Structures are given as C-alpha cells and as structure tokens.
Image (cartoon, rainbow, N blue to C red):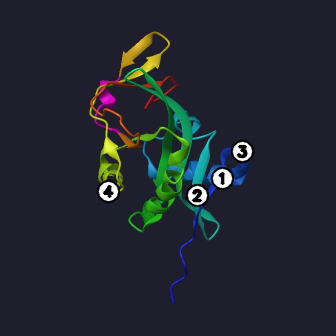
Amino acid sequence: MARPAAPAVVTPTALLGAATLAQVRDLMDAAFDDFGDDDWDHALGGLHAVVVEAGRVVAHAALVQRRLLVAGRSLRCGYVEAVAVDPARRGTGLGTRVMSEVEAHAPAYDVLALSASERATGFYEARGWTAWRGPSSVLGPEGRQPTPEDDGGIYVLGGTGLDLDAPVACDWRTGDVW
C-alpha cells in the first residue's frame, strides 16, 4: 500500500525556523537558474506553504501582502512568491498542494496575484488564474514607471469586478517589481 502524501503545512516566516528557511532557499536555488537575494527577500514576511518529505523540503509557495492600484482603487493583494518543487519531483502534485494552501487564503485579500514564468502559465491557468491583459507599471521612487516586460505574465485569482484590461500598478520593491 502506498504511503500517504505529506500535507502542505502553512506557517508564517517567523515560525519556520532557520533550518527550514535554509532548505527552502536551497530549493529555490535548485528550481530556478536566476533566483537571487532580492527574490528571496520578496518571499519573506508572510505565510509559507511547505511540503516536507523524509526531513527535506520538496515544495514551497509563499503568500505576502502587497498593494495593487487598479482604476483608482488600492487593492489589498495576496502576492504569491517563490513557488517551487524539487526538480526531481515535478509533475507529482506537489505544486498543486502548496498552491491550494495559499489559494485558501484568498478571502483575506481583494485579489491574489503572481508573476508567472512562461513554463508555469498552463499550471496557473488550469487552477483558474487569469492573465492580466492591461499594461503594467510600478509606483516607483520617480512616480509611475511602465513595466512592459511583465505584461502578459501577471496572473490574478479573484478580484470581483476587476477590469483585467485596465492598467495595473504594483508597489515598489528592489529587484523584480512583479
């Protein structure tokens, strides 16, 4: 008989512990070619959905709070960061487990959002996420700055009544703003 799959556990950053945080960071480095210190910083300070098997982190997703500006409305956004599965375990349902856990927190926000890699768009679309069609920008130190390189890669879940063709702006942060 097959062993039951390990559940995804949701924990705030402050309670993860140094050893688990180090394993999550190692997972990010294994899963992505270009995961830097700014990317890591973006994933901290919120909630983490983590799957641990045999004492090792094999899947992770973070949910942090951000602000999005759409049509004059400032939206409380649950922003999904650092979604990764051990490369040897991709396609085994681990990504679905961690995403289900962060998506369960959608009622706490006006909208959930994330920036998807081209490789992951089908995964998010199958889960009900929708690509933002309008132009994107960031509310930076010098005012609103267009981010055309991010257009088409921003996905949202929820957000009743949002015009997905409207311009969308995110709050400023170092590194990748989306």
Residue at the image position 41 percent from the left and 39 percent from the top: 159
Q: Amino acid at mark 4?
A: Ala
Q: In the depicted view, which residue is nearer to us: 69 or 120?
A: 69
Label 4 belongs to which residue?
A: 126
Pointer 2 local density, CA inside 10 Å: few below 14, some 14–19, many at least 20:
many
For badge 2, the amino acid type reads Val
Question: How far apart are the two marked residues, 4 and 1, measured between alpha carbons?
Answer: 26 Å
Question: Is 72 part of what is drawn in magenta?
Answer: no
- Pointer 4 or 1: first along the chain: 1
How far is disc 3 from disc 1 in space, using C-alphas? 8 Å
Query: In the image, residue 27 lies at what x, y percent?
Result: 53, 53
Q: Residue furthest bottom?
A: 1
Which of the 4 quarters of the picture holds residue 64? top right
**Residue drawn 47% across and 53% down?**
84
Name the front one of labels 1 and 2.
Answer: 1
Q: What segment carries the magenta color?
A: 147-154
Can residue 99 be seen in the rendering of this structure? yes
Q: Which residue is mark 3?
A: 14
Q: Which mark is residue 11?
A: 1
Q: SS at mark 1?
A: strand
Indicate the secondary structure of the residue bearing disc 4. helix
Residue 148 sits inside the magenta stretch:
yes
